[in-house]
Amino acid sequence: TGGSHTITSGNLITDLGSVTATSVTLTIDSTLPKFTKSFSPSTINVDDITRLTYTIDNSLNDQNLTELKFNDTLPTGLTVARFSNALTTCEDSISYPYAFAPTYQVVTPATVTAESLSSDISALGLAVNAGATCSVSVDVVANAPGSYRSVSGELTQNGSNPSGSATAYLTVDQPVVGQTFLKKTVAPGDNTTLRFTITNDDRDNSLTNLSF
């Protein structure tokens, strides 16, 4: 919950005597939204797609927030999918910049940029109401096996009031038998090649009597 929280230790007792207890105070600013991200599913195979979702949680705040933005660069081995299916549930940002014209609105559309096969994702013009939560989602494809730790840039309000970065973890496995279309998008009536790849990560033992 928001506010100041103090943690106080007990006295430290040693052979040479005791040391007075110590305390520390943590202040949680509920005017700043919580910023998180996650992969779903969090374990996939090479060439599979996972949904990456960024969540902006303003549930502890009694004020609407506008002009939210963030950038994210995916780690090497992950890219935006060929069809990103980028989506946001956040509202457009509305501001009233002129005191002499208090009803004049400036609307900044909530915009998500995630180009096909790029490693860069960005969002700007996001707004979330008081006590509410909104999200940004993008499809991501894995190009290599491994364990990935993906850390975003900070969520800010037009460059100020940072809420910190968001971190998510993804495990990408290399299946023994994988398959992929060499040309994944074709016109009606066109041909493409389906390639099967058999991988043996065991350095000591061979795979025999394979069939599928």
Image (tube, helix red, strand yellow):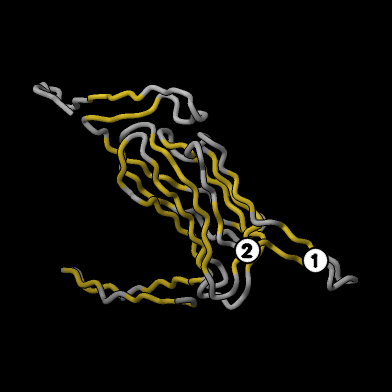
The crowd level at tag 1 (other Cα within 10 Å; few <14, some 14-19, many 20+) is few
* Residue 117 percent across, percent down from the top left: 50, 34
Task: Note whether 40 is above or below 200 in the view shown.
Answer: below
Can you see residue 53? Answer: yes
Asked where in the image residue 142 lies, by quadrant, the reply is top left
Asked where in the image residue 101 lies, by quadrant, the reply is bottom right
Q: Residue at x 42, y 49 (%)?
A: 51
* Residue 8 percent across, percent down from the top left: 34, 76
- Do the residues under discs 1 and 2 have CB atoms within 8 angstroms? no
* 149 horizontally vs 189: left or right: left
* Residue 41 percent across, percent down from the top left: 34, 50
Tell me the quadrant of the picture where the N terminus can be found: bottom left
Decide which of 18, 143 is in the foreground and name it.
Answer: 143
Q: Residue at x 49, y 64 (%)?
A: 34
The residue at which mark 1 appears reads as 105
* 179 horizontally vs 188: left or right: left
Q: Secondary structure at mark 2?
A: strand
Decide which of 71, 154 is in the foreground and name it.
Answer: 71
The residue at which mark 2 appears reads as 91
Q: Looking at the image, how many numbered discs can be counted on the residues? A: 2
Decide which of 165, 79 is in the foreground and name it.
Answer: 79
* 113 horizontally vs 150: left or right: right
Tell me the quadrant of the picture where the C terminus can be found: top left
Can you see residue 204? Answer: no
Q: CA distance from mark 1 to mark 2?
A: 15 Å
Pointer 1 or 2: first along the chain: 2
Task: Note whether 126 is above or below 50 in the view shown.
Answer: below
| Amino acid type for the residue under numbered disc 2 | Glu
Asked where in the image residue 96 lies, by quadrant, the reply is bottom right
Q: Secondary structure at mark 1?
A: loop
Q: Residue at x 36, y 48 (%)?
A: 169
